[in-house]
Amino acid sequence: MPTILVVAPGPLCRNPRPLKEAIALAAAGYDVTALTGFISDEHTGIDRALLRESTVKLVVAKPPRRVRHFWQRARVWVARNAVTRFGISSAWALGAHSSLFKAVRARPADLTIVHSEIPLWIGHRLLTTGRRIAADIEDWHSEDLLPEARRSRPLALLRKIESSLLQRAAYCTTTSASLAAALAARYGGRTPAVLPNVFPLQPVPLARPSRAPELVWFSQTIGPGRGLEEFLRHWAKLPASGGRLTLLGQIAPSYAAQLRAILPPDCQSRLSFHEPVLPSALPTKLAEFDVGLALEHNEPASRNLTITNKIFQYLNAGLAVIATPTAGQIEVMKTASDAGLLLDFNDPDAHTTLHPFLQNSTAIGSAQIAARRAAEQHYCWERHAPTLLNLVEQALRSPA
């Protein structure tokens, strides 16, 4: 039985792509181990519960003792300052990686699949040892984040990693046709296969009551630069028929106050906040709403080209979708053209597009039906898992 090692930077409950991948490969008969970074015993417990009905073995790379952990944090700080001041790139600028690197090296496998920045660096390093590596480039890491945050990023190293994996890995996957084409144009090599951030189909949502629409946006953390400020400025121009908005995730009280301040006083009660829910509870929670917001910026390039999991979660839950016109999300909305609307923040009159849709319960209901149909026919894990299985089968037949 071929052995497969799936490497994630942190808990699987925060990394849905390696979670889905590991479970699908184990179900196909492979001997699968999921190797993850450590955050807390609580997260490890959640991961074990997520894998309870699977044969996937979970290994957690715990950090070193406290003194050594402090030393690693110091090395990260020094490395990031070296990037900022002198342009010197090193893997430590990506974060503390020694525990995960040692754990991966200690577990040889017929195929090692790496996800996210530090595991991608590990995969790049292990290619030189003859290890058979596959890489999931979920985001374009060297073209991510805003300019201020990029100052301490080891961009030269990230580009080297991306190029190396695209040229030499057994296969590469990514999240959209737009990002796959951009990566191939930048680095050459094979065009990555596309595995969208889709999920297993959840039960068909119950019929929703007739009401002013309930809107939702979700993330693990709620912070600036996510499109919320721009949306609220347009939504603030709508009357009460524009519905209510719930932001689902962890938020600092100061930032919640900033968001409320964007709205006129008579509108502020229509904005509410809800703490995060467990990944297993998210599909049911989203199904309580009517419209899902998929808000992304066109800059940086990674945000424009990738397709995050939000829009697919909304389609799965049968929510009408309001999406910003990034290259990645345009891909989805071309296929699910009746599932909602594209909203351009750069249009000062965007609220005139938003209002007729939100006050039309018939249009929202039709969009909800189209959204669920798009999930069933195109955007669910059941449709895309065979692509992964074919890639793995071919990789295992090829020389390391």
Image (tube, rainbow, N blue to C red):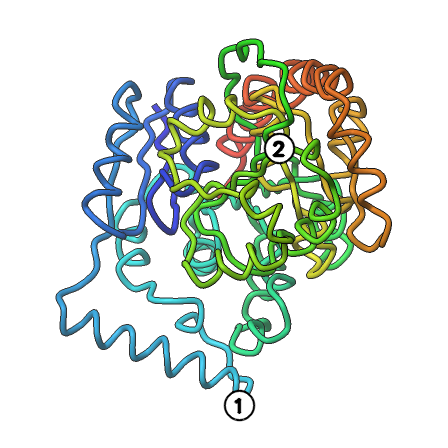
Assign the N terminus to one quadrant of the image: top left
User: Looking at numbered disc 2 in the image, what kind of residue is underneath it?
Assistant: Gly
Tag shown at residue 86: 1
Above or below, 379 relative to 351: above
Quadrant for residue 173, please give it: top right
Q: Nearer the viewer, residue 112 or 40?
A: 40
Residue 86 is situated, as x and y percent measured from the top left of the image, at 53, 90
At horizontal 36% and vertical 75% (from top left) the residue drawn is 76
In this image, 166 relative to 17: left or right? right
Residue 310 is situated, as x and y percent measured from the top left of the image, at 58, 37
Q: Mark 2 or mark 1, which is nearer to you?
A: 2
Quadrant for residue 145, please give it: bottom right
| Residue bearing mark 2 | 292
Residue that protrudes farthest toward the front in the picture: 266
Residue 242 is situated, as x and y percent measured from the top left of the image, at 70, 35
At horizontal 62% and vertical 46% (from top left) the residue drawn is 267
**Disc 2 to disc 1, C-alpha distance:** 44 Å
Callout 2: helix, strand or loop? strand
Q: Nearer the viewer, residue 77 or 89?
A: 77
